[in-house]
Amino acid sequence: MTGYAQPIRQLISELAKFPGIGEKTATRLALYILHTSDDNARKLAHSILEVKEKIHLCSVCFNLTEKEICDICADPLRQKDVVCIVEEPDSLIAIEDSGSFRGTYHTLHGVLSPLDGIGPDHLRIPELLDRLVKNNVKEIIIATNPNVQGEATALLITKLVREMNIKVTRIAFGVPMGGDLKYADRMTLAKSLEFRRII
């Protein structure tokens, strides 16, 4: 990277900060940006700034939205008394794309991970408990990833909800252990929701 001019080195360095992007891929992206038209470069820069300025969390489910309440929460046809709990917005999108769920969601924005310093206070669990009481929720579906952190998070939520007279189910393990919901195909996600089980 030392042979490149400083602005290119800086761009490569910034692009390499993206998850899954190494120095070689960052270099290819930087060179593509360099050789693309000024108009395309401006569109890319504008899109990045627009996302940072306009996107925030839904005040109900904490999904990403540009409105106060996301389209799913605002939809009067959704089952408000069934809440699917997911780790991140990309898991929500994966389940939504399966077309098999008509309830609402709650996005935790992470999972328990003591080694990384992430405890219950770092997740949207207090907001979840408050929402369950206020909205007379009948069932929660825990759709955290089937790995150690996801299971620990599911167990904690189950314990916290146990006295609330709410049916607690867990998505079936059509999703492989150690897998990630955002990479699962639609059929696997649909079957996982269909065959969910009581914890």
Image (cartoon, rainbow, N blue to C red):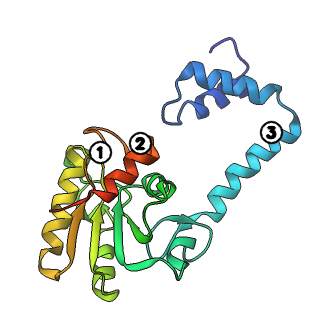
Question: Between disc 2 and disc 3, whose residue precedes?
Answer: 3
x, y percent for residue 100 = 44, 61
The answer to whether the residue labelled 3 contacts the one labelled 1, judged by CB atoms less than 8 Å apart, is no
Residue corresponding to mark 3: 41
> Would you identify the image quadrant in which residue 127 lies?
bottom left
Graded by Cα atoms within 10 Å as few (under 14), some (14 to 19) or many (20 or more), the crowding at tag 2 reads some
Question: Between disc 3 and disc 1, whose residue precedes?
Answer: 3
Would residue 4 be found to the left or right of residue 153 on screen?
right
Q: What's the CA distance linking mark 2 and mark 3?
A: 33 Å
Q: Nearer the viewer, mark 2 or mark 3?
A: 2
Residue at image x 20%, y 66%?
157
Number of on-image labels: 3
Q: What's the CA distance linking mark 2 and mark 1?
A: 9 Å
For residue 174, which numbered disc appears in the image? 1
Q: Nearer the viewer, residue 193 or 88?
A: 193
Residue at image x 68%, y 11%?
3
Q: What's the CA distance linking mark 3 and mark 1?
A: 42 Å
Question: Between disc 2 and disc 1, whose residue precedes?
Answer: 1
x, y percent for residue 68 = 57, 77
Q: Secondary structure at mark 1?
A: loop
The amino acid type, in three-letter code, at marker 3 is: Ala
Q: Quadrant of the C terminus?
A: bottom left
For residue 184, which numbered disc appears in the image? 2
